[in-house]
Image (cartoon, rainbow, N blue to C red):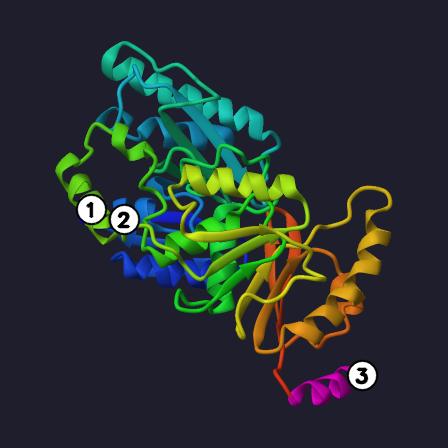
Amino acid sequence: MAEAFFSPCPRGLETLLADELRSFGASGVQTLHGGVAWQGDWAACHRANLESRLATRVMWRVAQGRYRAEVDIYKLAYSVTWAKWFTPDDTIRIYVTAQKSPLKSLEFITLRVKDAVCDHFRTVSGKRPSVDTANPAVRIHLFLTADTATLYIDTSGEPLYKRGFKPAAVEAPLKENLAAGILRLSGWQPDEVLLDPMCGSGTFLIEAAMMALDIAPGLGRHFGFEKFRHHDRAGWAAVRKAAENRRQAPRRLAIHGSDIVGEWVRRSRVNLEAGGLADCVTLERADLLERVPPAAEGVMVTNPPYGVRIGEAEELAALYPRLGDALKQRWGGWRCYFFTADANLPKLIGLKASKRTPLFNGALECRLYEYRMVAGSNRRKEREETAGD
């Protein structure tokens, strides 16, 4: 029997995620604002958790109903057969999000859902689960529209962009699933040379190497559904084994990373080592304004620094024209992609963007700018076109 699921993702990647979910066996796929609703069996759910590079979670819909007041939500949550899926010994956490809900306090709604779940268990077993806000065994999500309440159990556990390694990462400016989506949007293929010349902690490099070697991004971690009472262990083992069998052995790839800051190069190396990918990627300390392309043509994908501290904006304003000059002088034959929230980059870089794709990094609205650098004698024509913009 098909179950109903919802998979959130970074805004702007919904269509790509829909295609990816179809490849896992999803049906009834519907792109929504910030995610994809779909139907499928538990094998599809397992594959989506294990193999999706773009989803943030896979949430299983367990109840839906109309509401007008808090009591309606309590009744809906109480009516769900929670005890079929987990025990009162499992810790829980309730998450509530709303769009245009008339109810005043989401905190109060969170408490009412928690009360309903606990009261259900008291009725069924005489014992109630406890709440753990840090590391719950079961995450329950309530989503409210103006008049409809939907309850989900999170089958993922930790967000799917947490691949299970990257010990040297600070709070990453770019989540792994957004980086994977940007690589997909660039059209990069594993037989093309790839460079991130501002590689930071190596997120683009790691995601690209995993794509090239067909490594399922969830192979290094566990999932929420593994704790369910009705978990199909044999089915899950088969899905996992199939992914492990597709995984290719590490080898030197045409993937390059560099950064002007030596500490970031070190962090990238530590993170690549943690993923078993250190021998796959070529890393070096280099300044993009001066470095030589690693090949005659390829794909450059990077997330330039964004000026948030005093003085940085002025430094970047001086950098962008020099960056445009460097690209024109040395990077003919390359497709270059810059992901940024800085509206000054396209104004100051002095190049004509062939594509601008809106994306969101969390709540921050960004753009992915594509610059196709023409090679050889066509450069003069490109300069003339840019000058005429």
Please indicate, yes or no, whether residue 108 appears anywhere in the rendered image: yes
- Above-or-below relation of 288 to 62: below
The residue that mark 3 highlights is 387
- Above-or-below relation of 152 to 253: above
With 126 as the anchor, is 17 left or right in this view? right
Q: Residue 253: within the magenta? A: no
Q: Nearer the viewer, residue 333 or 11?
A: 333
Q: CA distance from mark 3 to mark 1?
A: 55 Å
Is the residue marked by circle 2 packed among few (<14), some (14-19), or many (20+) residues within 10 Å? many
Q: Nearer the viewer, mark 3 or mark 1?
A: 3
Mark 3 or mark 1: name the one nearer the start of the chain: 1
Under mark 1, the amino acid is Val
Find residue 87 and report its horizontal and vertical position in percent: 26, 19
The reply to whether the C-beta atoms of the residues labelled 2 and 1 are less than 8 Å apart is yes
The residue that mark 1 highlights is 239
Q: Which mark is residue 165?
A: none
The residue that mark 2 highlights is 47
In the displayed orientation, state which residue is furthest to the top: 126
Find residue 256 and report its horizontal and vertical position in percent: 51, 57
Q: CA distance from mark 2 to mark 3?
A: 50 Å
SS assignment at label 1: helix
